[in-house]
Amino acid sequence: MLAVVGLATSSLALGGVAYADEIKMVGVITHIEISGKDAKTATATLKDNKSEKQVDITVNDSLTLDKFKDHRIVEGDEIKCRYEVKGGKNVSAYFRKTAGC
């Protein structure tokens, strides 16, 4: 019984590590740049609501890219996002409008 409790506790502790590197922020989009002909990536610049710093976020997921293309997400929208720093870039893990979309 103790082994099961210990295993469950260690699993929960290690599960939290995956999110330790993610950074959360809410900000307003100031610029969107869709890259390349195939449009498999985009860079959205957000102005962080707390620090007022400009942060470039690389977006790779097709759902968000489609929202950029058909203008469901545009400059001026407030976004809630989570991102990880990978290879010197801020790569989006979650990118949604705060009011829903």
Image (cartoon, rainbow, N blue to C red):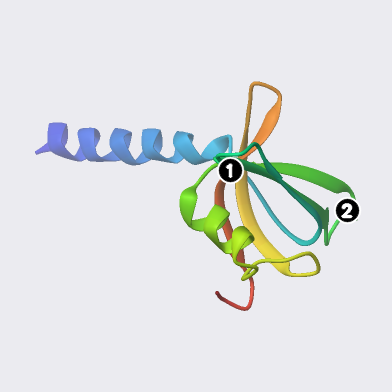
Residue furthest to the left: 1
Percent x, y of residue 92: 59, 44
Q: Residues within 10 Å of mark 2 (few under 14, many from 20)?
A: few
Q: Residues within 10 Å of mark 1 (few under 14, many from 20)?
A: some
Q: Is residue 3 above or below residue 87?
A: below
Q: What residue would you read off at disc 1?
A: 39
Q: Which mark is residue 53?
A: none
Percent x, y of residue 63: 48, 57
Percent x, y of residue 35: 67, 39
Tell me which amino acid carries mark 2: Ser
Q: What residue would you read off at disc 2?
A: 51
Percent x, y of residue 93: 53, 45
Q: Is residue 62 above or below residue 86?
A: below
> Between 37 and 19, which is closer to the camera in this rendering?
37
Mark sitting earlier along the chain (1/2): 1
Residue furthest to the right: 52
Left or right: 12 as drawn, with respect to 2: right
Front disc: 1 or 2: 1
Q: Secondary structure at mark 1?
A: loop
- Please state, as top left, top right, bottom left or bottom right, where the N terminus lies in the image: top left
Tell me which amino acid carries mark 1: Ala
Residue at (48%, 50%) from the top-left corner? 62
How many numbered markers are drawn? Answer: 2
Q: Secondary structure at mark 2?
A: loop
Residue at (65%, 62%) from the top-left corner? 80
Residue furthest to the top: 87
Badge 1 vs badge 2, beta-carbon distance below 8 Å: no
- Please state, as top left, top right, bottom left or bottom right, where the C terminus lies in the image: bottom right
Place residue 75 in its image quadrant: bottom right
Residue furthest to the front: 37
> Between 86 and 24, which is closer to the camera in this rendering?
86
**Label 1, label 2: how far apart the Cα atoms are:** 30 Å
